Amino acid sequence: MKPNFEAMSRKELLAYIREHRDDDEAFRIYMDRVTAEPTTEIYPAPQSIDDLKHFPELLEKHRRERKENQ
């Protein structure tokens, strides 16, 4: 009996896939979720020293969002 992949979180599903590498259905569902998520925000390269002042804040925001989505 297979688990309910739809009820699993993305993190749980990834853990399942790592343990059951030949389960194509689980992999397909996982990839559908990954591709359905909005793309991450893209920031332009810093153009000046002033632009770098905000870098630590942007980096922390990115890390928080990434952690939440795993």
Image (cartoon, grey):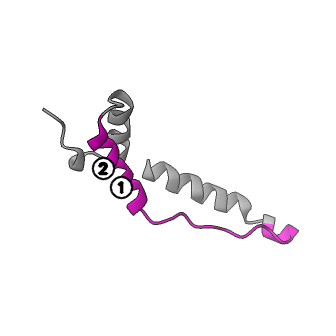
Q: Spatial distance from mark 2 to mark 1, Cα to Cα?
A: 6 Å
Residue sitting nearer the eye, 56 or 2:
2
Instruction: Identify which amino acid the numbered label 2 is placed on.
Output: Ile
> Of all residues shown, which one is farthest toward the left?
1
Amino acid carrying label 1: it is Arg
Above or below for 32 versus 25: below
Say left or right for 29 vs 58.
Answer: left
Give me the residue at 44% from left, 47% from top.
Answer: 70
Q: Magenta stretch: residue 40 in it?
A: yes
Q: Residue at x 66, y 61 (%)?
A: 57
Residue found at the very far right of the displayed protein: 49
Residue 28: x and y in percent read: 32, 48
Q: Which residue is mark 1?
A: 33
Q: Residue at x 73, y 66 (%)?
A: 54
Vertical position of residue 22 compared to residue 43: above or below: above
Crowding near the residue tagged with mark 1, few <14, some 14–19, many ≥20 C-alpha atoms within 10 Å: few
Q: Position of residue 32 (x, y in %)?
A: 35, 55
Residue highlighted by disc 2: 29
For the image shown, how many numbered marks are present on the structure? Answer: 2
Does residue 21 lie above or below 30 as drawn? above
Contact flag, marks 2 and 1 (Cβ < 8 Å): yes
Instruction: Give the image location of residue 34, x and y in percent.
Output: 41, 55
In the image, residue 68 sits, relative to residue 17, either above or below, namely below
Range drawn in magenta? 23-51
Outermost top residue: 19
